Image: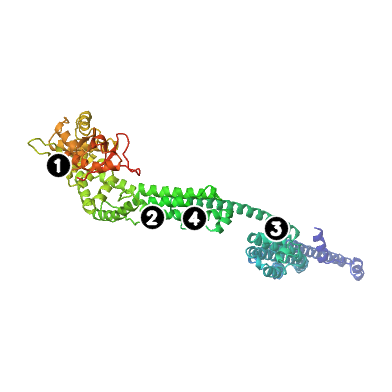
């Protein structure tokens, strides 16, 4: 209220009281009554004047209060408006002219309030107060504008610094140009901030360039950091601050340790991989295969094994020699091994003997592989190109087998390998395929194959499926023969009963179907396996006929016995015997048909050649015996009955003394061969 009282003193007019004594002297001449009237009039006038003054005073008080309130309103409105202006400027990023804009906005607020004052004196008072406050408004706006500009510039140079750091981090060679461009950005900062900010930014930029260069070439940076500060010749290294230099030094040392550890790990990995490659190639060389991609000296050095390269080269040489054995026969291989075998007195015998052992293993592998699986060996060694067999396509199947038979026969002649038309895997697959066929389908398939192949090739193929389908193999072999098999001996007035080998094979395959029907066949026939006599009855008659004729091969005897049972089942079925009762006549026929017949020489049984009778066989053997006896170095007194013949093939017999084979002077076993 002190301000209000001051305001009243400045705006309320002074009242001067009338001089009553003077008035009485002027009117001294009037009468007593006139004096009384005059005094009353004067009193009334004074009362009116005081009332008017009181009213005027009250109006000025109201105007003063209103002006004071408007002074407060100006400040309040300015605070709100200034915040709005600051927000707009910050949002637009436009700070230039903010002070002028603020002054204009403030003047608008003041002008609006001045228009509403209630008296001239109030207006004058409010204007004075507004002018005084405008100094604060101008100062605050100026400081805000300046501060925001600095903040904006600092932010902009900060963004520029981030971009510059990314550039030099990936391209340290651009450091100088990037640094100079960045310096222009920092020039916009106020002088009091510029120097310190630029120094920090340049050191940060130099560190990032140094770090990027270190990631690319840590050894170069390592050498630069070892130079005297400022004399490395690399700008970003020379401009590093002390702290940044220490930090980059630590990062470089860490990176070098990491790279060294990685290099050791990579070398160890290369060494391990190289050893695996050497081992793989050694295995190939040991198997007689060549190496298509030899290992270079550089690879050995990179793996830290440069001193072993010479040994590897010698192994390659031995490998080349080993691969050449693929086309050699056994005699040539033996001669080569003798030539390469080192003498114990030679220098470096240990290493040379090691490589000789590699060559020796190669020879064993080559001989073993081409004996165990000739066709696969020929394909692996590029001796022949084979096409996948498809028995479901009989024409293509037979044609491919015919093509293979030529190469197989050549290999047999040159290398002594067994005749074969299929790889071992193909033989298994073919056996599985044939096992799912009926006897009629098998006869048709085998007949088609037989017509396409020479006899030796066809018999070799049947031999290949013996391991998985022994009975089918035996029947298939019979399908390829044109001889008549004696199934019943003749008498004085009767000729022997015979059966074509083809029919014997058919019976065996038919019996297989009866003894081992598929689920579908069981359902179609309405019964299970064909009823058979006891195995005791069958075995007794079988042994009674064959004796020890199969003593050289129990496996073949087992197969022949199963074929005998199959023939029995088929013949019994043909005669309508489904009772399972033993039929001696059928059993004898089956035993003779499957075995081909048996005779005795020197107390031992032998199998007759297919389609040849007993007398013819013995006569032929007696004719061959003198030559065989001479070959074995036996005296002329030794007769055929004095030796024990062992059946080892169709019409092929090995001569023995009952315990061991008879041999010629070269250690070769003596055989007698009868062609039916």
Q: Residue furthest front?
A: 636
Q: Residues within 10 Å of mark 1 (few under 14, many from 20)?
A: some
Of the two numbered discs 3 and 1 on the same chain, state the one appearing first in sequence. 3
What is the C-alpha distance between the residues marked 3 and 4? 50 Å
Task: Determine whether, in the image, residue 422 is placed left or right of residue 442.
Answer: right
Please report whichever mark, 4 or 2, sits nearer to the chain's N-terminal start: 4
Q: Give the Cα separation between the discs numbered 1 and 4.
A: 61 Å
Q: CA–CA distance between discs 2 and 3?
A: 67 Å
Q: Give the camera-side residue of 338 and 572.
A: 338
Q: Quadrant of residue 439?
A: top left
Q: Which mark sits nearer the N-terminus, 1 or 4?
A: 4
Q: In the image, which is nearer the foreground, mark 3 or mark 4?
A: 4
Pointer 2 or 3: first along the chain: 3
Residue bearing mark 4: 316
> Where residue 84 appears, x then y in whole percent?
66, 63
Residue identified by numbered label 1: 499
Report the disc number at residue 121: none
Q: Give the image location of residue 174, x and y in percent.
A: 65, 68
Most foreground residue, 253 or 179: 253
- In the picture, measured across the screen, residue 23 lies left or right of residue 261, that is right
Tell me, yes or no, whether the two marked residues, 2 and 3, touch with CB atoms within 8 Å: no
SS type, badge 2: helix
Q: Secondary structure at mark 3?
A: helix
Q: Earlier in the sequence, mark 1 or mark 2?
A: 2
Sequence order check, earlier mark of 3 and 4 = 3
Camera sees residue 468: no
Please name the residue that numbered disc 2 is placed on.
327
Residue tagged by mark 3? 248
Taking 25 as reference, is 585 above or below it?
Answer: above
Q: Is residue 485 visible?
A: yes
Locate the C terminus and report the quarter of the image it occupies: top left
Instruction: Give the residue at the far left of this rendering.
Output: 493
């Amino acid at each position: 209220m002190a301000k209000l009282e001051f305001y009243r003193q400045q705006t309320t007019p002074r009242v001067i009281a009338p001089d009553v004594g003077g008035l009485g002297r002027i009117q001294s001449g009037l009468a007593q009554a006139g004096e009384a009237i005059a005094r009353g009039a004067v009193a009334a006038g004074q009362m009116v004047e005081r009332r008017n003054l009181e009213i005027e005073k009250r109006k000025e008080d109201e105007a003063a209060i209103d002006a004071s309130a408007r002074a407060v309103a100006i400040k309040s409105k300015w605070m709100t408006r200034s915040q709005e202006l600051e927000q707009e400027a910050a949002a637009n990023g436009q700070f230039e002219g903010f002070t002028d804009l603020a002054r204009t906005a403030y003047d608008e607020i003041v002008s609006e309030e001045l228009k509403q004052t209630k008296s001239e004196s109030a207006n004058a008072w409010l204007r004075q107060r507004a002018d005084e406050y405008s100094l604060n408004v101008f100062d605050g706006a100026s400081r805000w504008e300046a501060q925001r500009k600095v903040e904006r510039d600092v932010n902009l140079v900060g963004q520029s610094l981030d971009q510059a750091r990314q550039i030099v981090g990936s391209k340290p060679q651009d450091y100088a140009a990037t640094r100079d461009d960045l310096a222009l950005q920092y020039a916009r900062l106020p002088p009091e901030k510029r120097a310190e900010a630029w120094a920090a930014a340049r050191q940060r930029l130099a560190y990032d360039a140094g770090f990027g260069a270190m990631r690319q070439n840590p050894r170069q940076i390592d050498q630069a950091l070892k130079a005297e500060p400022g004399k490395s010749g690399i700008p970003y290294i020379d401009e590093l601050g002390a702290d940044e230099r220490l930090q980059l030094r630590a990062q470089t040392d860490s990176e070098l340790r990491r790279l060294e550890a990685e290099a050791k790990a990579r070398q160890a990995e290369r060494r391990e991989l190289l050893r695996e490659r050497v081992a793989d190639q050694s295995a190939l060389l040991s198997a007689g295969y060549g190496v298509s991609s030899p290992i270079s000296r550089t690879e050995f050095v990179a793996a830290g094994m440069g001193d072993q390269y010479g040994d590897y080269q010698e192994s390659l040489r031995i490998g080349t020699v080993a691969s050449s054995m693929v086309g050699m026969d056994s005699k040539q291989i033996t001669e080569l091994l003798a030539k390469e075998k080192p003498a114990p007195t030679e220098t470096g015998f240990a290493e040379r003997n090691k490589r000789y052992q590699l060559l020796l293993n190669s020879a064993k592998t080559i001989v073993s592989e081409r004996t165990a699986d000739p066709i696969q060996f020929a394909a692996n060694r590029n001796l022949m190109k084979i096409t996948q067999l498809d028995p479901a396509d009989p024409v293509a199947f037979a044609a491919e087998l015919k093509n293979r038979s030529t190469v197989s026969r050549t290999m047999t002649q040159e290398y002594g390998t067994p005749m074969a038309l299929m790889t071992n895997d193909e033989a298994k697959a073919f056996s599985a395929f044939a096992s799912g066929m009926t006897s009629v389908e098998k006869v048709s398939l085998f007949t088609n194959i037989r017509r396409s192949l020479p006899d030796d090739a066809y018999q070799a193929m049947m031999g290949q499926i013996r391991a998985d389908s022994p009975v089918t193999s035996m029947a298939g072999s019979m399908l390829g023969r044109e001889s008549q098999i004696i199934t019943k001996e003749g008498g004085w007035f009767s000729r022997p009963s015979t059966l074509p080998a083809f029919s014997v094979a058919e019976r065996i395959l038919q019996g297989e179907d009866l003894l081992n029907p598929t689920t579908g066949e069981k359902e179609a026939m309405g019964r299970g396996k064909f009823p058979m006599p006891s195995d005791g009855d069958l075995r007794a008659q079988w042994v009674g006929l064959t004796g020890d004729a199969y003593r050289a091969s129990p496996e073949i005897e087992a197969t022949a016995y199963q074929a005998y049972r199959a023939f029995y089942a088929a013949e019994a079925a043909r005669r309508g015997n489904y009772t399972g009762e033993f039929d001696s006549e059928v059993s004898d026929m089956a035993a003779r048909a499957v075995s081909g017949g048996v005779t005795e020489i020197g107390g031992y049984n032998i199998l007759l050649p297919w389609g040849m009778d007993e007398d013819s066989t013995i006569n032929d053997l007696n004719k061959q015996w003198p030559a065989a006896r001479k070959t074995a170095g036996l005296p002329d007194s030794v007769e055929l009955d004095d030796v024990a013949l062992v059946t080892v093939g169709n019409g092929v017999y090995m001569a023995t003394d009952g315990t061991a084979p008879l041999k010629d002077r070269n250690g070769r076993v003596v055989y007698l061969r009868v062609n039916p």
